[in-house]
Amino acid sequence: RTSICLFTRDLRVHDNPVLQHAARADRVIPLFVLDEAVLRGPFTRPNRTAFLLDCLRDLRTSLGELGGGLVVRTGTPATEVAGLADEVGATEVHVAADVSAYAQAREDSLREALRTRECALHVHDAVVTAHPPGDLVPGGKDHFAVFTPYFRRWAAAPMRRVAAMPEALRMPRLRTGKLPAREELCPGELSPELPTGGESAGRQLARQWFADGIAEYESGHDDLAGDATSRLSPYLHFGCVSPVELVDRAGNSEPERAFVRQLAWRDFHHQVLAARPASSHRDYRPRGDRWREDPEAFRAWCDGRTGVPLVDAGMRQLAAEGWMHNRARMITACFLAKTLHLDWRLGAQHFLDLLVDGDIANNNMNWQWMAGTGTDTRPNRVLNPVRQAERYDPTGEYIRRYVPELRSLPAKALHDPRRIDPADLDRLGYPAPIVDVDAANAQFRADRGQP
Ligand code: FAD
């Protein structure tokens, strides 16, 4: 028997059921296809492409240590897999189940291409997520729309065992193909402070996190300047670390439980998207919003020049690091959708342009949550950036870090730009607020029929 292990968003050798099962054949070919349709689409951006290439280099090394290698081809996954299956006489193909409309279509086309070839397609669950989407459903429905009951079921359901790593891989002689340079795949500027991708870096970060980061998680995860979260999101997005292994590794302390709950949020959004793939771009619950068109305001938001320091700090963190603190993502997203009343899709795409962890399920479903078109059970609540700054950046340290021109100002002024003398703003080269936040938020509530 010869198998093909098609890597997608599971770029790891530890706890990978796809690789584990594929390696049971007499010979296995680990394969990654640089998908031309994805490369041409709006999802391929410099930051994620650089991280992906790190992941592939690292995976190639790890597979090499097991006696294998990583074949890299460019094209359409179904065509490349079918071609390789013919070339080596493969009888089985293994791949991870995934949730986006694109991933589901890829699975269909793989099945179609292999149907006439006496080559079986094995799709493995609980690789990308901890629990397979669709396994946990409320009576008579195809997904949970509310997190709390979902989490109750999620926490009680048995999780699959951590998969053993194959001891050795037997791979036929094949040209593995060179990895292209990042600029060839996706030219453009990188964020200056990107993390290094790959399973080795992800496992190292996870080890450190469990050894000494997680203790402060429950109390500190909302503290913007404290930066007390795991930063594992890009490694989870590309599958360099396994969500099942993280849950398995976490103990029962309060901070560990709080961390596991966040991993369940990840699964929650994935099961919503799996059941409603169109909600990547269509309102999950349309509420009749008529989004404003205001390209100048949108540009100011993207550039971190809205004149609202906390919003600008978040947007500049995104540009610098390809990552943003969760609390800042909530505040900047709410500001775009509810205060500026611009279409959430614009903001979601800008996030996807830069986020290394940019993920259709987590990004677009969180955006819908913040815009009040998604699964939030209180869709009309609006975050006030002044109060958020007072609460989550009390000393102003986060704002000072990312908006250095305001460094000399006291926290009170950083929290509330109305306290900054317009003459000072001019001198510091920082814009006046582009919107009256209180009036705009009141208008949003009024439009939604709220007092
Ligand atoms: P930690 O706090 O250490 O959490 C551990 C893991 O739990 C994260 O790595 C992530 O996989 C998961 N997680 C945590 N919070 C959430 C959440 N609210 N929803 C889903 N999963 C969560 N996350 C992404 O991975 N990709 C995205 O593209 C993305 N876009 C977002 C857009 C908006 C508007 C908002 C409000 C949130 C978004 N998130 C996204 C969720 C969250 O902000 C990030 O997962 C988190 O900030 C990553 O940092 P961390 O790994 O240090 O998180």
Image (cartoon, rainbow, N blue to C red):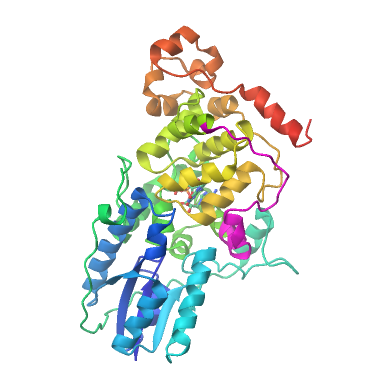
Q: Is residue 381 above or below residue 146?
A: above
Q: Nearer the viewer, residue 385 or 372?
A: 372
Magenta residues span 268-295
Can residue 149 be seen here? The reply is yes
Q: Nearer the viewer, residue 208 or 229?
A: 229
Q: Is residue 204 above or below residue 341?
A: below
Can residue 97 be seen here? The reply is no
In the displayed structure image, the side of residue 391 where residue 211 appears, left or right: left
Measured as percent of width and height from the top left, residue 43 is found at 43, 54
Measured as percent of width and height from the top left, residue 36 is found at 37, 64
Measured as percent of width and height from the top left, residue 7 is found at 37, 70
| Image quarter in which the N terminus is found | bottom left
Number of numbered discs overlaid on the protein picture: 0
Q: Residue at x 23, y 84 (%)?
A: 172
Quarter assignment of residue 162: bottom left
Measured as percent of width and height from the top left, residue 286 is found at 71, 49
Q: Residue at x 53, y 53 (%)?
A: 362
Quarter assignment of residue 90: bottom left
Tell me, yes or no, whether the highlighted magenta stretch contains residue 355.
Answer: no
Q: Is residue 440 above or below residue 165?
A: above
Tell me, yes or no, whether the highlighted magenta stretch contains residue 293.
Answer: yes
Q: Nearer the viewer, residue 283 or 325?
A: 283
Q: Is residue 329 above or below residue 31?
A: above
| Image quarter in which the C terminus is found | top right
